[in-house]
Image (cartoon, rainbow, N blue to C red):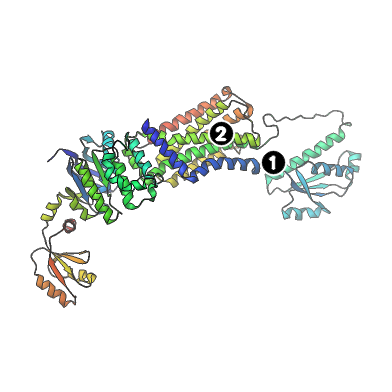
Amino acid sequence: MHPVSVRVDNLTKRFSETVALDDITFHVGKGELFGFIGPDGAGKTTLFRILTTLLLPDRGTCTVEGCDVVKDYKRIRNMSGYMPGRFSLYQDLTVEENLNFFATIFGTTVHENYDLIKDIYQQIEPFKDRKAGKLSGGMKQKLALSCALIHKPEILFLDEPTTGVDAVSRLEFWEMLKRLKEAGITILVSTPYMDEASLCDRVALMQNGRIMSISTPLEVIRNYPLTLYSVKAGDIYQLLGELRNYPGVHSVYAFGQSAHVAFKGPANQADLAAWLKAKNHQSVEITPIEANIEDCFMELMTA
Amino acid sequence: MKRFRGFVVKEFYHIFRDYRTLLILFGMPAVQLLLFGYVLTNEIKDAKIAIYDPSKDVATRKITDKILSSGYFILEKNLNSVSEIEPVFRQGEVKLALVFETGFAGKLEKTGTARIQIIGDASDPNTANMLVNYATGIITNYLVSMNAKQVPSQIIPEVRMMYNGELKGVYMFVPGLMAMLLMLISALMTSLSITREKELGTMELLLVSPLRPSQIIIGKVFPYVFLSFVDACIILGLGNAVFGVPIRGSVALLLLESFLFITMALSLGILISSMTSSQQVAMLISLVVLMLPTILLSGFIFPVENMPWILQILCYCMPPKYYITIIKSIMLQGNGIVYVWRETLILAGFTSLFLTLSIKKFNVRLA
């Protein structure tokens, strides 16, 4: 393992009655692209706020680049870039003014660190005189990333950066993250989209304030314990409902225009096809498939 | 320092791009002053009166002439009987009725006494009171001039109203308005601008930045100190140019005292914003907790001396009261610091209290 950038041990945080983070432990290596996947309310934002020194932990220790989030919070604030989940730039300032503002308060200039943001900023530069509030979702997110990067942080905290952003922009955004990782920046990113998990070096699956598993995307897929089939038929809704009643079925999920059906052990494809035909399903297609990362997380979350 | 300057520049962008803020900042002082100066006066002119004069002789005619030429009254109706008084009042136009007794001049001549009844519409007690006073005054005057030769000794009070010879209401409103507007702009605007950052989530980014809390606070406050100052000058200038409100004392001292008051109001604004995270609540607190006492309990409109003692104690806890006292003293009486040092000290005490509290309460983290 490389030197550790973020070290979290037995972290607990509660808000009156609700436990937002429950005894969490994980380490992130320097230069790693580390993802947190989980539904809303899993505790991702709370975790990011503690790591960016905005909230105090109730129990446990957290260090970022060797600095304690409670005692050395000023040093952490100097070297980390943070992109909150909600678009949090000044809507009444133009693109350029926002960028300049964040450069100045970090004691630097846009010119000084232009290299780092060049790839990203160039895409929104044609609109640099436009008010930030009038940008599209994808452009807002690029601007926010530029602002978080402008002081050349050693570590980036991106809280659901791709929520509410179109598919193309999402893809572009992850391309940018890869380039930033190559520049040596440690990146912690959270997302509710499971498909994005496969783009991280390692992924932590979070649910109800706990980390269910931490591993590389490949390991996640390799550890999938079930046999999986993709089933297609004319009426997908009816199909989903009936598949759940098929003897031996472990789980059924809709996946675009097909259903992913999982069995605990081996299953007979022909039997299933016959069973569906008997239920009046037209043009039934059944193919055995490899689990993708979403199948794995769905399984982990129900486990 | 560069960081700080960047921050202040950003604040000015916010202010100048929001035309509503601008309107409040610069439109309100002018509009309020003109309103208070022209419309909201407690002097009464051209009140309508009705007269029942059954004698119609020299004396009654002279008194009627005097009353109608005073500028305070306009004759609405000559009544034909006492029974018409009530219906005339009911119509609402007439505020005062005069009733002469029959054979007025004759009785005055013979016995030295004649009666006039003055009837006021006291559904508005203040107006009725004032009108009755005006009318009584005019009649007394007439009597004095008539009797000048016959009565051997009389005392004639020579009244002179110092510092505001014509008893203009606007002399009182300008200081009060200064206090009110500076309070509003300083406290309301800063509390709004800080809570706005909290609402939009940008406060999160500011906190995560290396900016110190004091830099954030002073950066937020600085533009408003400047703008409030401009406003103070607008009010003083307008008051002077349009209404002739004098500044008899030192302008520099006046501005310094205003600066002290502005700082006090601003720290109150920050204090408010540290207690709430929504703009609406901040606005409500500013208006209810700050504006109402400034108007009601500062001696601006209602004299403190006439209040029940509980309210009086409350009044002495209101910073605007001291500010109003100070600027009245400087503007109208031309006093120097020697006369207002006590109030200045109290104001300075309030300022440092609120400032310390607000910096202490400002959170370097969320919640």
Disc 2: which chain?
A: B
Q: How many marks?
A: 2
Q: Quadrant of residue B65?
A: top right
Q: What chain does badge 1 belong to?
A: B
Q: Is residue A176 visible?
A: yes
Screen quadrant of the N terminus of chain B? top left
Q: Residue at x 43, y 41 (%)?
A: B13
Tell me the residue at 75%/40% (across/down).
Answer: B134
Cβ atoms at labels 2 and 1 below 8 Å apart: no
Q: Is residue B189 left or right of residue A294?
A: right
Res. B276 visible in picture:
no
User: Measured from the top left, where is residue B308 in percent x and y?
Assistant: 58, 37
In this view, the residue in front, B258 or B70, is B258
In x, y percent, where is residue B298?
56, 36
> Residue beneath label 2, please?
B233
How busy is the neighbourhood of tag 2: few (under 14 within 10 Å), some, or many (20 plus)? Answer: some
> Depth check: B313 or A127 in front?
A127
Q: CA distance from mark 2 to mark 1?
A: 27 Å
Q: Residue at x 48, y 28 (%)?
A: B349
Q: Residue at x 47, y 32 (%)?
A: B263
Question: Quick one: label 2 or label 1, which is nearer the N terminus?
Answer: 1
Q: Check disc 1 and report the residue beneath it.
A: B43
Q: Residues within 10 Å of mark 1 (few under 14, many from 20)?
A: few
Which residue occupies the foreground of this view, A68 or A179? Answer: A179
The amino acid beneath tag 1 is Glu
Residue type beneath disc 2: Cys
Dot in front, 2 or 1: 2
Q: Secondary structure at mark 1?
A: loop
Q: Residue furthest top?
A: B338
Residue B28 lies, in percent from the top left, at: 55, 42
- Image quarter (top left, top right, bottom left or bottom right) of the C terminus of chain B: top left
